[in-house]
Amino acid sequence: MNSLVRRSARQLSLWRSYCVKHGGPEAASPGRPNYEEFIGRHQRQARCSIVVQVSSEKSYPELYNYCSRFGSILGAHHYCVRQDEALHYVLLEFATPDEAAAAIGAGVSNGDLSGVPVRSPFLWFRAAGGGRRSPKLAQANPSPQLLSLDGNRQVEQSHLLGLLRGAADIEEQVQLLHEHTRLNELGVRMRFLAALQVQQAIAGMFPAAQAQPFGSSVNGFGRMGCDLDLILRFDNDMGAKGSREAADPSRLVYHTKENLSNGRSQTQRHMECFGDMLHLFLPGVCHVRRILQARVPIIKYHHEHLDLEVDLSMSNLTGFYMSELLYMFGEMDPRVRPLTFSIRRWAQTCGLTNPSPGRWISNFSLTCLVMFFLQQLRQPILPTIGALAKAAEAGDARVTEDGINCSFARDVERLGFRSRNQSSLSELLLQFFEFYSQFDFHNRAISLNEGRPLSKPDHSAIYIVNPLEQLLNVSKNVSLEECERLRIEVRNAAWVLESEVENASPPESEGQELSWGLLNLFKHPEKAVIRPNMFFKPRMVEVSDLFEQKETTTGSNAPTTT
Ligand code: CTP
Ligand code: MG
């Protein structure tokens, strides 16, 4: 019997304890926030927060004493940017937005240096005037501990490898990799503060404008150091709020400037203007680049107080709703995110992905491949997007400014989807590589809407139907050569992992260089042996199994590409 079908008692018990610890599919997370709650909670947190540059973390008690006059400080995080000439910052969270606003309002401009005085949540803590120490407030409440000390630092590669080496089995390796490389709480807070800074800067003229983070910063698939995707929205959310107001629309209508006939060039002009504004006035914003000819025009900048790369767009709301879908997928089953992290790490180490965009597969496309794999299993772990769209109710209605329908059930419970799949993470990892070793990229497109492969409508090397704009291909950029490399690498990975999964736990011998399990997937490409097809071991899952009728029905709003 092959190893995928055989389930040892040990694996079953591992699975059960895993479900207890992380919340299994049956225990679909009632108390966890949905996407909008998650976003709302972090937006409020950002409004309650300020970032103060200090000379070192030792300044914290004095900063705490000083800032306590503005309100109660709930927590503080310390971080550094630029390892070489470490600049220290403390992010302080007050109990209310008014308290943070009072602290910001009490700031003064730096008279010695030129520069337009701009209010923002980014401040610095200067030494008390004339060498005096700042008067100590009555220390009724001692300063709370810094919640994280240098909490923005990525885990050292050698430390991570050591952790993986010491794990009990591949399951634990996958978990450890996820826990130690995912974007942490401070990382999320910093990204929401960057968004708030932009929003507050333009609030005078655009009080309804919202700068909303999307992409890996908020969809739960972000790693430490990931970029911030930000969309500046001027619309009044066409969703539930719009439909409520429709019952009694206001008779007072704003006068506005006439739109240019070409919406795209208008967006480009507006973005140029915002790019200048960010560049000239916003503290921390540097290296502003305008990429206005792209399908979705963006402004890129670096935030030097947050050590963060930002991509700001003003159109393409579908990307924002796509992040909500990915967030929901990640919340549905505790295996989804750890599995995706391992696969993304593997792709990074064998050079399939690259931080700069190009003809290679992006992290987002790779994530789509993982979601599709989890949908098409004989016992699916994720529902199709078609099924989610079908279960949408009035409150789920979302339409972008271009009229693209992004309505899908936000409450997954309504779908009644329960996965009976009990595969372990190592089994799923292996199945993923096997599935794509056999996938017919030449003729088939990947549809997350249907959860099954479709006929490919054009000659793109890889075709992933964009779930919300179904006439677009998410992976249009991927060249034939890169697709071929992907096929070779998934084959290699399946080959390596098969023996690792069979062994399941680390070899007995101890040693510094001991490499086993996941570590063998993460070997540098130079070390990886490209194994031709003929040596590829026989598959353990038949292709016919993979494409068989599944236990749950797929949604009905199928893409036109069949
Ligand atoms: N997006 C999309 N369609 C694309 C590309 C991107 O809908 N063809 C959306 C997705 O929601 C994606 C987000 O835009 O998550 C941001 O894209 P990108 O920064 O490329 O990917 P991330 O998911 O943020 O991953 P990374 O950490 O590599 O930035
Ligand atoms: Mg991103």
Image: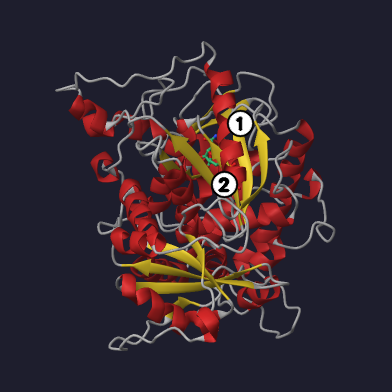
In three-dimensional space, the C-alpha distance between marks 1 and 2, rounded to whole angstroms, equals: 14 Å
Query: In screen coordinates, is 1 left or right of 554?
Result: right
Instruction: Specify the amino acid type for callout 2.
Output: Phe
Choose between 341 and 510: the one closer to the eye: 341
Tell me whether circle 1 and circle 2 mark residues in contact (CB < 8 Å).
no
The quarter of the rendered structure image containing the N terminus is bottom right
Instruction: Give the residue displayed 55% in from the left and 61% down from the top.
Output: 426
Q: Return the x and y of residue 78 as percentages of the image width and height.
A: 51, 74
Circle 2: element type: helix
Q: Which residue in the structure is indicated by mark 2?
A: 281
Question: Could one spot residue 393 in this view of the protein?
Answer: no
Query: In screen coordinates, is 18 left or right of 170?
Result: left
Q: Which residue in the structure is indicated by mark 1?
A: 272
Image quarter for residue 558?
top left
Q: Quadrant of ligand 1?
A: top right
Question: Is the C-beta of the residue carrying label 2 under 8 Å from the nearest atom of ligand 2?
Answer: no
Which of the two discs, 1 and 2, sits closer to the camera? 2
Instruction: Specify the amino acid type for callout 1.
Output: Glu
Determine the residue located farthest toward the top in the rendered image: 261
Question: Could one spot residue 252 in this view of the protein?
Answer: yes
Graded by Cα atoms within 10 Å as few (under 14), some (14 to 19) or many (20 or more), the crowding at tag 2 reads: some
Question: Is the C-beta of the residue carrying label 1 under 8 Å from the nearest atom of ligand 1?
Answer: no
By what rule are the colours in the image chosen?
secondary structure
The answer to whether 336 is drawn above or below residue 8 in the figure is above
Instruction: Give the residue displayed 27% in from the left and 39% down from the top.
Output: 415
Q: Return the x and y of residue 395 as percentages of the image width and height.
A: 23, 33
Q: Return the x and y of residue 323 as percentages of the image width and height.
A: 46, 42
Q: Which badge, 1 or 2, is on the more N-terminal residue?
A: 1
Circle 1: element type: helix
Instruction: Give the residue displayed 74% in from the left and 84% down from the top.
Output: 511
Graded by Cα atoms within 10 Å as few (under 14), some (14 to 19) or many (20 or more), the crowding at tag 1 reads: some
